[in-house]
Image: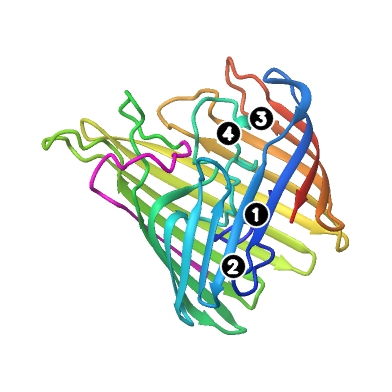
Amino acid sequence: MISGSATKPLSPHHGSGVEPHFSIYFDLLLANQPGKANFSFLNFHPLLFFEILPTPEIQFAFEVRSDPRYFELDYQITPTIQVRAGKIWIPFDDMNPHNIYGGRIDTSRMRLGGDFFLPDIWTDLGVGAKITLAEKAAVTSEAYVYAVNGIPQQSGVTMPSFADQSVSVTDNNSDKALGARFHFLFARVFGLGVSFYTARWNNEAAANDTPLRLSMAGLDAQLRMGNTSVKLGTIGMWVGLPGDLTYRRHGAYLEFSEKFSDVWRFYLRGGEIDTDDRLTDANDVVLVGGGLAYKPGVVQLSLDYQQDIKTVPGKLGYSFTSARIAVQL
């Protein structure tokens, strides 16, 4: 999926008045991941979103499925302040809607290990706001702030769960996750973003439970000059454990993209992920790869290759090759 600014995905159009609008994104891949999956046809993105704008100031959107990962009410209360409520997108880095830490678009079915680095679609129940700080030719800046339930504890394990959370899951403690993102775009060429997130993650089963915190910090940058673009990002996570212990998780990515015309794009991408600095296992990846995409309209054709160069005993599926057709409306 194409990555963009850190708000909502799949919204190339908007409804008029109370007219509803559907955004769709479906793909079909012919993929090969030796050691992990057979040469086969796959589908990663069966996505359908609904949007409606009953007034110019109000927008409501949600994912159409029995257990929606996203629903959000946006209200533009002033020209510079928009408030949000629902299972809102978490504005962290330049993700839209997936992150690309590790050098690949984050979908759980492509992971080599069993750990999620972040949710495939990072949303959470809560409220937030987008504040336009400046909007000039020299600099455009925005701030995002939010309070949501937060990353919960894994069932039966004293570790946080970074998997996608069902809309029906209730919070496991009274502490709310607080976060913020600031993004600056200079001369419409160079972008710089910084993101923060902090929350208690462990259960609040008894009054004497010691609160354990998860804190995240991220930095991202984008350079766009004509048909050439470069973007990079890094994230660090610090997870508190019982006994005043802490372990660290980190990820990074770098992407170079070149458009040869209005319809052809070539890109190179790399990155790394370490889900736990206390050990080395199949969840640790260092990826390099690239691809070629052709998008003459609503249909996109692409070829993609990725190679994990982090050798770990027992890891399977080091390479991933795919031909993909996707439809986005």
Residue 270 at x, y percent in the picture: 66, 43
In this view, the mark in front (3 or 4): 4
Residue at numbered disc 2 = 191
Q: Of helix, strand and loop, which one carries label 2?
A: strand
Residue 46 drawn above or below residue 220: above
Image mark count: 4
In the rendered image, which residue does mark 4 sit on? Answer: 108
Residue at image x 40%, y 56%? 196
Mark 3–mark 1 CB contact (< 8 Å): no
Residue 169 magenta: yes
Callout 2: 10 Å neighbours few (<14), some, many (20+)? some
Q: What's the CA distance linking mark 3 and mark 1? A: 24 Å
Name the element at disc 3: loop
Q: CA distance from mark 1 to mark 2?
A: 14 Å
How much space separates mark 3 and mark 2, taking CA atoms?
30 Å
Sequence-wise, the earlier of marks 1 and 4 is 1
What residue span does the magenta drawing correspond to? Answer: 163-183
Q: Disc 1 or 2, which lies upstream in sequence?
A: 1
Identify the secondary structure beneath mark 4: helix
First in sequence: mark 2 vs mark 4: 4
Q: The disc labelled 4 sits on which kind of residue?
A: Ser
In the image: residue 152, left or right of residue 136: left
Closer to us: 268 or 208: 208
Q: Is residue 91 visible?
A: no
Residue at numbered disc 1: 3
> For numbered disc 1, what is the local secondary structure?
loop
Q: On the image, numbered disc 3 is attached to which residue?
A: 309
Q: In the visual, does 56 lie left or right of 179?
A: right
